[in-house]
């Protein structure tokens, strides 16, 4: 399988060299920044987006369903990573710098690991697709970060473009194909949580009733004052 990928990979290695070649003349601080972003930064950013989506989901009318969709995101990523274990062994594709030593490698410790599919790309796209199903605005931002993750992996010299695309495809398939089964379990689970002490994790407390009562309380004296005006006028007439 790795041989087939290599035989059809002239454009694959060509695109990798073009992206990775940007690191040749780049300043050291930029290489360090991209290394950190590609290894940890984007995943942390996606986690922050997930937190923001959860805060928004708790205030929605369909909060239990929305929170259930967000719970599906990390579960889908875990399933995608499990699915990648046999796939990577079947393909058995070494890292690109093994067959192409001219590449600039900015991440250490990848020599003994396999290249297809890209775990970072799969995790990023899995979270992005799951968030997109729940919150379109946040999901689009997450999708942009997932695409940036793929570019970073190539810039670092640790993945071919097809490794990145394979990670995207694997994560998207897992999220979309298994979502109906997952939601059939997670939605009742979240509804059940609303009847427990953990309800604030699913539904935010609403203060509309309190504010409404306060408005009515403040408005009452004004209405009573207006109702007293005709009486005062009649007294003056008398």
Image (tube, rainbow, N blue to C red):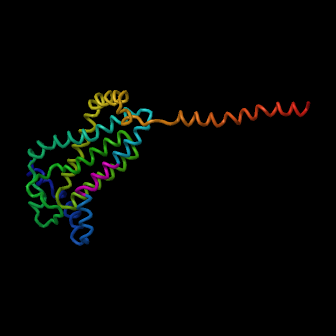
Q: Quadrant of residue 180?
A: top left
Query: Residue 77: image x %, image y %?
Result: 23, 42
Q: Nearer the viewer, residue 160 or 223?
A: 223
24 horizontally vs 71: left or right:
left
Query: Residue 3: image x %, image y %?
Result: 8, 52
Q: Magenta stretch containing residue 46, yes or no? A: yes
For the magenta stretch, what is the residue range? 38-48
**Residue at the (31%, 29%) spot, across then down:** 189
139 horizontally vs 154: left or right:
right
Query: Residue 227: image x %, image y %?
Result: 76, 31
Q: Nearer the viewer, residue 51 or 89?
A: 51
Vertical placement of residue 140 versus 211, above or below: below
Which quadrant, please, contains the C terminus?
Answer: top right
Q: Nearer the viewer, residue 233 or 104?
A: 233
Query: Residue 30: image x %, image y %?
Result: 27, 67
> Which secondary structure is most common in the magenta stretch?
helix
**Residue at the (21%, 59%) spot, across then down:** 154
138 horizontally vs 39: left or right:
right
């Amino acid at each position: 399988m790795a041989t087939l990928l290599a035989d059809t990979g002239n454009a694959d290695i060509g695109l990798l060299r073009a992206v990775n070649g940007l690191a040749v003349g780049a300043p050291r601080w930029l290489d360090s920044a991209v290394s950190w972003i590609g290894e940890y930064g984007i995943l942390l950013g996606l986690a922050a987006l997930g937190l923001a989506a959860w805060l928004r989901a708790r205030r929605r009318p369909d909060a239990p369903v929305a929170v259930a969709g967000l719970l599906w995101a990390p579960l889908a990523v875990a399933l995608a990573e499990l699915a990648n274990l046999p796939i990577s062994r079947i393909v058995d594709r070494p890292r690109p710098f093994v067959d192409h030593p001219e590449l600039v490698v900015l991440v250490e410790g990848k020599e003994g690991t396999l290249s297809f599919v890209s775990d970072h790309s799969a995790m990023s796209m899995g979270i992005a697709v799951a968030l997109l199903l729940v919150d379109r605005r946040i999901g689009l931002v997450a999708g942009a970060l997932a695409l940036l993750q793929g570019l970073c992996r190539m810039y670092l010299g640790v993945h071919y473009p097809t490794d990145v695309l394979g990670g995207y495809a694997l994560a998207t398939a897992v999220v979309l194909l298994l979502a109906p089964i997952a939601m059939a379990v997670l939605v009742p689970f979240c509804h059940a949580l609303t009847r427990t002490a953990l309800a604030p994790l699913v539904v935010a407390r609403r203060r509309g009733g309190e504010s409404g009562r306060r408005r009515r309380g403040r408005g009452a004296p004004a209405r009573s004052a207006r109702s007293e005006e005709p009486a005062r006028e009649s007294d003056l007439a008398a």
